[in-house]
Structure formats: structure tokens, C-alpha cells
Image (cartoon, grey):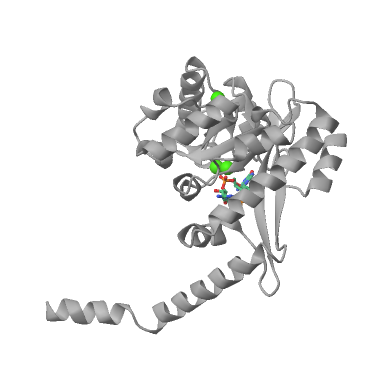
Amino acid sequence: AKAEGRNRWRYFTPAMQKAAEIRSRTVADLRSALALGQFYLQYQPIVELESGKVHKAEALIRWQHPVHGIISPAEFIPIAEESHLIIDIGNWVFQQASRQVACWQTAYGSDFQISINQSPVQFHGESSAHWASDLNRMGLEGNSIVVEITEGLLLDASETVSRQLLAYRDAGIQVAIDDFGTGYSSLSYLKKFDIDYLKIDQSFVRNLTPDSSDRVLCEAIITMAHRLGMKVIAEGVETQQQGDILKLADCDYAQGYLFSRPLSADAFAGFMLE
Ligand code: C2E
Ligand code: CA
Ligand code: CA
Ligand code: CA
């Protein structure tokens, strides 16, 4: 017990101290970032494979830090979740995306949709309870917004989570399962909740070749999704071959560098002109 105690003690020495300091400084920076206007959204086109048309985009947040430059969401979202700052940040993302979708529905048609990523912490804080009425007030249909969530949220779906998903359904706000296939082996949540889209995770697309087992998995996911009345979006599509295999497999939509990287709102408008 003594040795264990000593080990534990050694575990919490300078390096960890340092990491904790960096973290708390980041939390402080994050706290002021919203007020200082340091966040912005980029939009990645989601292409309908059959027609080649784009009437969807995913909003992805970026942080322009005054000292460290552009910080990726993979770095700061976990810290924002832990500190619950994600609630304010998530509401900002929703607001920003709603304004953008209003503008793009005028430009590209009333079926244009923007999807936003929603963290489980936002569900537990019930911070999206007012989204439906916000859309309504802006004169937008509920299905202007697609909310991307991960499997983990649904696996242990609490009363709170279920209630909010039902509220989305009532409002017409659509729901996508992000990173599908990476989270949990249980699929029972697919019949329990009203899911509109499955997003096939990049890890199944990365090594997609005609003879790969990933091709079998993608085809199986697509068949299952369609039979359950869902559409499928493949993520991380980088090569023509991947795009061709997915189209042949009847995948509905694709997103990835093959078509476009995430773009500023202005650059997105330029992309749509092409
Ligand atoms: P995600 O939702 O799975 O988003 C897809 C990520 O893949 C994005 O990284 C995107 O830039 C990247 N990507 C797109 N096409 C390709 C491709 O062809 N190849 C490769 N290798 N990557 C591609 P990003 O923007 O760095 O975002 C990382 C993650 O951060 C997102 O993963 C999402 O989980 C989270 N995130 C981003 N924005 C938000 C947000 O507003 N709120 C929350 N809660 N999370 C966010
Ligand atoms: Ca996503
Ligand atoms: Ca729905
Ligand atoms: Ca994803």
C-alpha cells in the first residue's frame, strides 16, 4: 500500500502540474473567446451522389486564438465540454448556423440544410430546449437544421435526452448519428429513436477499395439504413475511387476533400457558383 501510495504520488509531479496549468489557462481563454469574437464557423459541402447537387453543409467550429493561432475543435471541444462552456459555445454555433441557413435557403432553395454538432453535455444541460422556437421566430422550418450526435448519447439515453429528441421530432429538426460504427455494438437505439441520417465514419472510408472488407461494411450499413428509412452520408471521402464505390453501393450523400475542404461562408458561396 505504501509503494502504491508512493507511485501515485510520483504520478502527480511537474509534468501533470504543467498540463493542469495549461488546461486552466485554456479554460480562461475559452471563457473570453466568445465575448471577444474569436470563434468562427466553416462549412463543408455535403454532396448528393446521385445528382452531384449540394443542398447541405456541415458547420465546423474554429477558434482563432490571439497567441496560438487557429486551434482545432478536436483540441478545445473536450475542454469546453468538461468546463460546460460548450453550452454557450453550442448556442452560439446554433445561432450562427441558423442565420447562415436562412441566407442560403434564399440563395439555393428552401430545402438547404446546415448540420451542427451537438455534444452530450448540451443535452444534459437542456440548453437546446429553445432551438425549435428560435427557428420558428426566424421564420425557418425545423428541418433547416440537422443535429449531429454520437451513438454514446443514445446508448444510455436518459429521460432528459429522450425528451429533447422528441422535441426535435415534433419541431421537424432532423437528427444524424455521427461517426456511425465506431461507438457501440448495440444497434437497438436505431429503432427506439427517430434518426434521419447515419454518417459512416471516416475509418470505414479511408481504406475503401473494391475488394476491401470496409466495402462490405459500408454496403451493409447502407442497406440497413435504407430499410429502416434513414439516409446515409459517408464522411472523409478523399478519392474518386471511394466516391465511386459509395455511389455504386447506393450511398445517398458524401462529404470529404474529394469535393471540398471546410470553407468560410464566402468561399462556400464561391464553391456553389462552380
Ligand atoms: P466530425 O463531426 O466527425 O467532423 C468531421 C471532421 O473531419 C472535421 O474535422 C473535418 O474537417 C474533417 N474532414 C472532412 N473531410 C475530410 C476528409 O476528406 N479527410 C479527412 N482526413 N478529414 C476530413 P474538424 O473540423 O477538425 O472537427 C473535428 C471534430 O470536432 C468534429 O468531428 C466534431 O466532433 C468536433 N466539432 C467540430 N465543430 C464542432 C461544434 O461546433 N460543436 C461540437 N460539439 N463539436 C464540434
Ligand atoms: Ca459531425
Ligand atoms: Ca426526424
Ligand atoms: Ca464524423
Image quadrant for the C terminus?
top right
Quarter of the rendering containing residue 241: top right
Quarter of the rendering containing residue 269: top right
**32 left or right of 120?**
right
Q: Position of residue 148 (x, y in %)?
A: 55, 38
Q: Nearer the viewer, residue 236 or 207?
A: 236
Residue at 54% across / 55% down in the picture?
86
Answer whether residue 197 is visible to the viewer in this image: no
Q: Nearer the viewer, residue 138 or 205?
A: 138
Looking at the rendering, the quadrant in which ligand 2 lies is top right
Q: Position of residue 183 (x, y in %)?
A: 41, 41
Q: Position of residue 128 (x, y in %)?
A: 55, 43
Residue at 54% across / 75% down in the picture?
25
> Is 14 located above or below residue 171 in the figure?
below
Answer whether residue 133 is visible to the viewer in this image: yes
**60 left or right of 155?**
right
Residue at 48% across / 15% down in the picture?
227
- Furthest residue toward top: 227
**224 left or right of 45?**
left
- Furthest residue toward bottom: 14
**19 left or right of 135?**
left
